[in-house]
Image: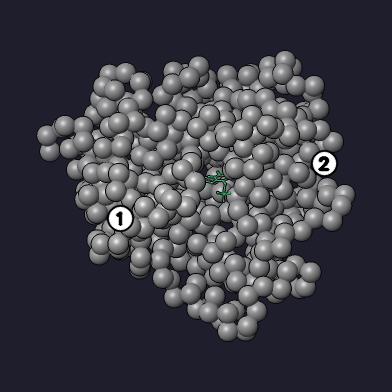
Amino acid sequence: MTDDLLARHRAVLPSWMPLYYAEPIELVSGSGRRVTDAQGRSYLDFFGGVLTNMIGYDIPEIREAVERQLATGIVHTSTLYLIRQQVELAEKIAHHSGIPDARVFFTNSGTEANEAALLVATNHRRSHQILAVRNSYHGRSYAAMGVTGNRNWSASGLNPLQVAWLHSGDRVRGLLARLSEDEQVDAAVEDLREVLATQTAGDVAALIAEPIQGVGGFVHPPDGLFAGWKKVLDEHGILFIADEVQTGWGRTGEHFWGYQAHGVTPDLLTFAKGIGNGFVLAGVVGRAEVLESVPAISFSTFGGNPISTAAGNAVLDYVLEHDLQANAARVGAILADGLRSAVGGLDCVAEVRGKGLMLGVEFVRPGSSEPDPGLTNRVFEAAREGGLLTGKGGLHGNVLRMGPPLTLTEEEAREGLAILVDAIRSAAGVAA
Ligand SMILES: Cc1ncc(COP(=O)(O)O)c(C=O)c1O
């Protein structure tokens, strides 16, 4: 029984690890974009285990690739031995990263990927000064948390880095919110110059930024902002790290990587979540010159192990062979247009935002920019009642987040859209 499991969970797992829903659910089976809970209730999944089940559930190509590797008897060897699956995946990722002369280091989580990126950037530049973005999330280790600009996720003030903060692309609140997109870019670039001149010793190692802020509620800057920033960074030799943990592999529809909306190439790119479709796989890609900045032995016992990289190869092949980026653009547009026309005009909706299959709805008290996490939660619960799993996020917990598998069909998008619109209207007390 789920009730019993909930009590056992609470008795043995830490309370700071949140569970979704007033009545938490246990998902016991899945197929395609649908999951079933322990009560036998089935849901269309628009959150995919936080954008991680990127292809969906029980995908034969991925299951069979993992089964083939399992059948060899080799689950793990350590990276002290050659791992064919790992080399093949690294070749593919290096090729698709857009980064010249790329090297790939595999880790077990996005946190570790960012930790590795920060390690090589700070070593390469011989500086522990980092620029990060307000409202960001980069993980739960000290350095990754140190560049996380969200109080709710900053569990410690201990920080191995010296961090200076840049403005996010928030259009709802904050100093740059009311500006036009061009003005926002100009102001953010001017701010970067001022931050460098006033809050750093000049020799900054890197800027780390998410193209679309995941935990931050899918806030994203105007296209081109990273190019404006990069011009200034280049004047100082400062590296640029794109955290593509949520935005990679075509999720944004318009591009394969989120950074590409800005017409720049990062020095380092971190990935995780979707590439394993649930198998533990993450990593960092970077120019050899930068990624080789490790003046000691460094290795990850499990990083890029044969099972994970068998899954990763199958996932990446699936993404490319089925052109899931194009699907994300096409199906994402159905959702975005549908949400904007059905609820975008409600005075409790501040913004419908995002790209491709990474879409958020921000809720506020009517006629203001005051966050309404209560309404967000009611919508979230109502959507589940209606048979749709979504996510929540944002600095104030007032953003509903949708990041379904990239295989979502048009019919499923319409089905989920109808549930969402009903949930929003009923929670907001708007007549259908
Ligand atoms: C943008 C981003 N970076 C890093 C992380 C950390 O990844 P992980 O939870 O795999 O350590 C996350 C996780 O949500 C994320 O969204």
Q: Residue at x 28, y 32 (%)?
A: 375
Mark count: 2
Q: Nearer the viewer, residue 118 or 432?
A: 118
Q: Position of residue 65 (x, y in %)?
A: 54, 76
Quadrant where the C terminus lies? top left
The residue wearing badge 2 is 123
Q: Earlier in the sequence, mark 1 or mark 2?
A: 1
Amino acid, disc 1: Asp
Residue closer to the observer: 57 or 232: 57
Quadrant hosting residue 260: top right
* Residues at discs 1 and 2 in contact (Cβ within 8 Å): no
The answer to whether residue 23 is left or right of residue 267 is: left
What's the residue at 57%, 34% (across, down)? 155
Residue 232 seen in the figure: yes
Point out residue 427 in the picture as x, y percentages from the top left corner. 21, 36
Q: Whole-percent x and y of residue 351? A: 35, 31
Q: Is residue 100 above or below residue 190?
A: below
Local crowd size for mark 1, using a 10 Å CA cut-off: few (<14), some (14–19), many (≥20)? few
Provide the secondary structure element on which disc 2 rests. Answer: helix
**Disc 1 C-beta below 8 A from ligand 1:** no
Please determine whether, in this image, residue 129 is positioned above or below residue 332: above
As drawn, 96 above or below 353:
below
Foreground: disc 1 or disc 2: 1
Q: Does the numbered disc 2 mark a residue whose Cβ is under 8 Å from ligand 1?
A: no
Counting from the top left corner in percent of width and height, residue 188 is at: 59, 22
289 horizontally vs 183: left or right: right
Mark 1 — residue? 3
Instruction: Please tell me which residue is depicted at 75% across the width and 21% down the height of the picture.
Output: 200
